[in-house]
Every structure is written in C-alpha cells, then in structure tokens.
Image (spheres, rainbow, N blue to C red):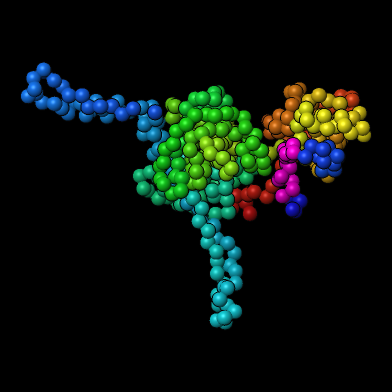
Amino acid sequence: MDILHKKLAIGTIAIVASSGIGAGVGKYFRQQQPSQLIPISNNSPSSIPFQPIVARRVQSENTNFITAVVAKVSPAVVKVDAQVVSPATENPAQKSFGRLPKQEQIEQGMGSGFIISPDGRIVTNAHVVGGAERVKVTLKSGRVLEGKVVGIDRVTDIAVLQVKAQNLPTVKLGDSERLTPGEWAIAIGNPLGLDNTVTVGIISATGRTSSQAGVPDKRVNFIQTDAAINPGNSGGPLLNARGEVIGINTAIRADAQGLGFAIPMLTATRITTQLFATGKVRHPYLGVQMIPLTDELKAGIAREPSLRSQVTAERGALVMEVMPSSPAAASGIRPGDVIIKVADRSISTPNDVQQQVEASQIGRSLKLEVSRQGRVRSLEITPGTFPTTAESPAQK
C-alpha cells in the first residue's frame, strides 16, 4: 500500500476493528388494501350496478402521499451514464497475427442524480462519474443532455455535474438534521437500469459512521434506511414524506439486506457548494489513527503492566499512530494519548473527533485535551489539508 492510500485510509480518523484486542493493545504504539367497487343502488334489481364516478373514487383512494411525492420529484431525477476510457493496451491477438493496433478499454458506469437548479446543476456520487471521459444525463422525459463533471470529492463520495439547459425541473432540499428514526423515506433512482424506480421504507437510524456503513475511507455520518437501494441508485435522492431531499443514496451493505445508507443533505450542501465554486473541497486533517477506548480495551490494558499506568482515561479516542510530518506530530500528540476533548466538546469515539475536526478550519488553531500517563494535557493543533489526489478534469 503506497503512502497516499495509507493516508486516505487513516485521514483524520481511521477506525480500527476492535477484534483481536490482546494483540492490538500490545502493538498500538506502533501502528402501504385495495378498494372495492361499490355499486350505486336505488334498491331496484334492474338498477345500473356501476357508474363512472365509482372508478374515479377508487383512483382517488389509491392516491397517497407517496404518489404525490413521486409526481412532484421524479421529473428532477436523472439517469447518469458515465464512460471511462482506459489507456490503450496491446491487442492480445498480436502474438498470433502480427502487430495490430492497441485497444482502448471502454467501461460504462451508471447511476442516478438530481437537479438542484433550473440551469442544470446536478448532484450525484463521485464513484458514479469518477474518471469519466464522457457523461450522459437522461431526464425522465427521455431528453438526453451532455453532462460536464464540475467537481469530485472522493472523501465524501459527492460529485457535481453541469448540463446546458434552462427551466429544468428541480428538487427541494430538506433538513437532514431533524430526522427521526421511524419516519418515512422514499428513494427514486435507476437501479440496474430500471429507470425511475420508486422504493419506500423508513429512516432506520441516523449518525451511522463510515465504518458501520462499510466504507471506512469516507468522512461522512450516514443516514441508514431500509428503502430498497440497489446498484444504479447511487447518487439519487432519499426523500421525506414532503418530497424534500434529505440525503444522497450512496451505499449498501453487501453482507446484509435492508441496510442502505445515504449522505445527509446538510453534508452534501456544504460539499456541493464548494465543488460548484472551485471544483474541489479542502478537508481539515490531523494525521492520527485512533480506536475507541472501550471497556474491553481497557480490560486488556489493565492486564498489561507496562500499559496500565500509561492509559488511565475512562473514555475517549486512543491514539494508535501519528503520521510523520502531520499536524498531529507537530502539535505533540503521541501514540498512547487518549483524546478526551476537541474544541471544548467531550469525546467518546474517534467519530466524535472526526466531526469536530471536519467542522474546524484549515490553518486555524484547534484546542484538544488529551490524557497522557494519568495527566490531562491541553494542546493546540493547526489542521492541515487532507491529502488526496481527487480533482476535477479541469484541474489535472
């Protein structure tokens, strides 16, 4: 693993699985019933059994808030087709038939997106359009537009596109901070190429860490939903009962069913604003690898005489490794320190650290408190820029 990928893996936080506690402690310093037609009767056997108004009534009864949301939002949900052209390689038939032209490898990717402005600004996932030479955007009406990748942020898996059009239908953005588990969730997208598919479920949970979602290299706290999400849904909107976008459908757990994850719209708005403005996003970065100080881990430490006096905090994020030449190294953070406060906020898990660092500003001092060998120490750290090579095509 090269140094860049190592950095992307650990970033501000890289949550290490808590399995193998004994070994980990030993080396942590190193590393919705159908309606029935009811006849209208005047008590006469020869009366006409059905009237057109009955059919209209049934249709009305079959209309619900979901159909209203779909009618309102689906015109602004698009299919995104991305074409990635790999470098030309030697034709495998060359050895038998002499020298033949090298062949380009063309890969097709497909996902979803949604329009946020009448002039053609579109939001999708970075993994849908990353590396694409050409992007095609198809509206529900069947209209096809050429799309340009304006910016990509692989750290949060968000990308933005631009198409040349006017007066396009748009979505309305909602408040992802007020979500309550159990409320309705509606997903619209193009799973497996099945255009404008609608699925319904609930918000299962909020604040799921990237590790819990199965994408530990992303710096996002996800919305969990059981609304069916499949390949091709990526980049499409997750909606509330009012038809407002509360998240971007992004990931599923391959080892489970009914576990889908979406990027909260609060996070997406912050990232897309930067991408449309500059084509890139700068994320604050400390340069530490941490694990949560759990009861199990503390018990393991207690069994190690050499560590017992060094790790005495009752909660926090235990620093396992400090990247060389990182802001953390410059600030004096050491392996074995337990981060207990960041910006005057108490810390229980590495994810707490991530959220506080992500809310900080690059180049501006950030206060930390760490527990080191039984003493609480105050430190100041100046976050740097998260190391990544993700760029928009215009920046390469």
Above or below, 291 against 84 in this view is above
With 109 as the anchor, is 376 left or right in this view?
right
At horizontal 13% and vertical 26% (from top left) the residue drawn is: 49
Residue 91 occupies quadrant: bottom right
| Prevailing secondary structure class for the magenta stretch in the rendered image | loop
Name, please, the residue furthest toward the left. Answer: 46
**Residue 58 horizontal/vertical position (percent):** 26, 27
At horizontal 42% and vertical 38% (from top left) the residue drawn is: 198
Query: Residue 54 in magenta?
Result: no
Which of 173 and 2 lies nearest the eye of the viewer?
Answer: 2
With 71 as the anchor, is 49 left or right in this view?
left
Total labels drawn: 0
Q: Is residue 287 visible?
A: yes
Above or below, 212 against 64 in this view is below
Q: Is residue 278 visible?
A: no
**Residue 103 horizontal/vertical position (percent):** 55, 69
At horizontal 11% and vertical 17% (from top left) the residue drawn is: 43
Name, please, the residue furthest toward the top. Answer: 43
Query: Residue 15 in magenta?
Result: yes
User: Which quarter of the rendering shows the C terminus?
Assistant: bottom right
**Residue 264 horizontal/vertical position (percent):** 57, 32
At horizontal 36% and vertical 48% (from top left) the residue drawn is: 142
Residue 200 occupies quadrant: top left
**Residue 62 horizontal/vertical position (percent):** 31, 28
The stretch in magenta equals: 5-19
Above or below, 194 against 48 in this view is below
Which of 96 and 294 lies nearest the eye of the viewer?
Answer: 294
